[in-house]
Image (cartoon, helix red, strand yellow):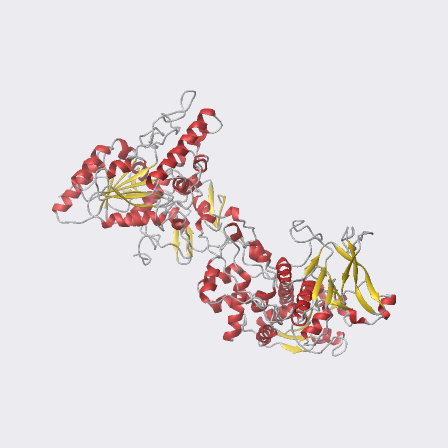
Amino acid sequence: MDKRDPFRHNVLTSGHRACSGCGEAMAARMVSDLIGPDAIYINATGCLQVFTTHNQQSAWQAPWIHSVFANAAAVASGIEAALRIRGKETPIVVQAGDGGTFDIGLQCLSGMIERGHDILFVCYDNEAYMNTGVQRSSSTPHAVRTSTSPPGRLSQGKHQLKKDVISIMAAHHMPYAATATVAYFPDLKAKVEKAMTIKGPRFLQVLSPCPLGWVHDSALSVTVSRLAVETGLFPLVELEHGELTGVMRLAEQRPVDEYLRPQGRFKHLFNSKNGAIELRHLQALADARIRRYGLLDAETEWDTDRAMQSERHGRGGYCERRSHGS
Amino acid sequence: MVAKLEIEPGSSNAYHTGEWRTQQPLYQNKWPPCSQICPASEDIQAWLALASAEQWQAAWHKLTERNPFPATMGRICYHACESACNRKHLDSAVNIHAMERYLGDMAIAQGWSHRPSCDDEQPERVAIVGAGPAGLSCAFQLARHGYSVTIFDDQAEAGGTLHSAIPDYRLPKSVLASEIDAILALGIELRLNSRIGEAVSESDLLDQYDAVFLAIGTQQPRLNPYNNGAEKARSNHSVMSGLEFLHRLNRGEQLAIPRQVAVVGGGNTAMDVARCVRRLGAEVTVVCAQDPHGTHHHELGTEMPASLTEVVEAEAEGVQLIYRAGVHRLVRSGDHLSGIEIAHVDRVHDRHGNFNPILFDGTEEFVAAGLVIFAIGQESDWRGLEVLQKTTEAEGVWVGGDAVSKSKLAATAVGSGYRAAMSMMARLKGDAVIPDEHKKTKITYREMQLHYYAKQPRLEGEINPKRLDGFKEVVKGLVDDDSATHEAKRCLSCGVCFECDNCWHFCPDAAVIKIEGGYRIDYDYCKGCGICAEECPCGHIDMGIVS
């Protein structure tokens, strides 16, 4: 066991094979450390499963099981039912990428929610099939270059829009569905902790930048995820039983340019006539999301400035301080 | 019974991803810009951090390591630190001078005393000439390190220019006296009314002491250009030097002042004189050879040398300023001075850099004044110190303070005294000079992530509404501990870790380990992505080449 850090468990420990600057590894480490080592983690096929369990070496310091791509939610449902019969209340967490959530795993996930299993389903959304070579998924945003949506004379990247999966989840009338991202740790922490207090199916979509597929500098993973929120392209919202119950207000709306420019997957949109149209389209999409969720005028103290604030001696962390070597 | 797996899974910890790294992060403290620009090299970030935790006494001790005059400097220093503060790119600079004053005033009120920095008594004796800020700062450092120190001063009171030339509305005498007493309490011998060459001879100083520090300041006013020939023979009541005026006023003399007074000069002394004249009830016009602030972007010699805050305060008190003008002649009717004739100044300094203005003919104007005060600079008075002046550091004589510094700020003098003390101790012990504890790299707001800080309003000390009513202090201090902690917490801690946890939270590889009082990077696993350096709010983390 890795007990290097006296202030957290490192449920997802070092030595995993994620790329340098991986947003998904960051997100999974945050979420699993917030939940702790006493939960059972079910992992759909995807980047996270591949890079954490390599050559008989596991980076997980908690019970962990790999299902196939499509059925993580079904495997979790079975585990939950078995534990319920045995009278145990072990937390159960499913982790999947956007492929295992939006596309291949959607049917099993829908069934898990409909049956009302007491499970937290976390989707680490990096907006394409990164592990197999950056193919488009239904989560890939509009106008993004992927290996299967290349821009060219007739195309400006992906034609279709990003699937609005959080609305699909909310439409199940499920107890808790929320979006979060790595840049705002206090927000992510509040959402995970809230989810863990609710019984029944819960869903968390965590936007996780991918330096490889998004083609940005590995140091910019947090910056890019912050800009996704600040431009309005990725609203941070909470939905309970289908109703919007919380949003993170934007202290200031930034133009989508600031989010798109550091990312090579949007490079083709700049300095081209057709690209300029798509840039305006993306700005209009951001504006529409801001209007839909009232991101600029929501009556809440919780805004992008407040969630960023750094304080002397930290924001606190994952668990109470442990003594060394315990 | 579940069958045991044939292959036991191992931990990924066995695989050292650190080998992938092409660059690596390094925790590196920097000198924040406030400390970098501070003439006294105060570790401002460090004492503000202590103050933000309400560790007032610790903060005061940290501050006085470099500057034993916080209550004084908090009032009179022109706080270059605040113009350098990176916070102005977020909202407005931290009110450092008000914090310094708050700590200094608290120390006086609570009667805190300075701590010696070592218990050992040193055998060497040091003589210091001049009990101004440079001499006292040097004496303070030496006494803290166990040396026996004697200060000689030809005045009846210690403090030098701080005592003789700073008006009461900027610095009450009692504040200065308390801080000097606290310094002397370290066991420093002070011999007042003792001019070298009269009370003690130069050779006695060299014989009896192992080292001498000359901090004689600039007590000799530069002569006004009309102090010759016919003018010299006249009664001197209508012409005075700024320094003489301030000295007499500070001694408590009741000066009879005509209704209109002209002050010549554009420095801080001229501003002090003009503001004092206003308080004596007269109208005052300042004639300054340079342009106003902000016209030449601080190009040397073309903007008036007085601090901007002084000019703003003076104008608020009704001081009239005439820029780009020089005195052409004094206008007299008999012995009575009726005013001065001024003219447009073209070039202020000649090509050797000396103050040598050219006045244009035909631009003359008359300024009515019954008294003209020249505040055009001052020089050192080396009489009686001819031998010591030529003696070098190798032979045991150091020189510092206004007498040798180009900048004549009190804080510069304090810094000069500190450096002289360090250099003396190094030579007396035969060691190298103690280096600064920070790496001296610049840190600008561009290397920081200002969005991690919340905007907070800057708190100011109140301004006395009846400011022209006598010589009462104009600016008040911060009201209470709450406002002081608020202001201290506004410090961005540029380049110095404040344990915000960002690097620890964001590391995708769990390669940042939180330890008591900071963090450690586990280079076995760090992939060198650079996120920690990118997201560090204060620019504490550098990315460097792999060692």
Q: Is residue B399 visible?
A: no
Q: Quadrant of residue B11?
A: top left
Q: Is residue B101 left or right of residue A301?
A: right
Q: Is residue B151 left or right of residue A315?
A: right
How many numbered markers are drawn?
0
Q: Position of residue B225 (x, y in %)?
A: 81, 62
For the residue pair A98 and B489, the one nearer the viewer reads as B489
Q: Is residue B429 above or below residue A118?
A: below
Q: Is residue B482 above or below residue B3?
A: below
For the residue pair B416 and B325, the one nearer the viewer reads as B325
Q: Quadrant of residue B332?
A: bottom right
From this viewpoint, which residue is outermost toward the top? A153
Q: Quadrant of the N terminus of chain B?
A: top left
Q: Is residue B58 above or below residue A152?
A: below
Q: Is residue B134 left or right of residue A83?
A: right
For the residue pair B133 and B372, the one nearer the viewer reads as B372
Q: Quadrant of residue B406?
A: bottom right
Q: Position of residue B391 (x, y in %)?
A: 75, 66
Q: Is residue A150 visible?
A: yes
Q: Position of residue B35 (x, y in %)?
A: 56, 57
From this viewpoint, which residue is outermost toward the right? B229
Residue at 46% from the left image edge and 63% from the top image edge? B485
Q: Position of residue A162 (x, y in %)?
A: 33, 32
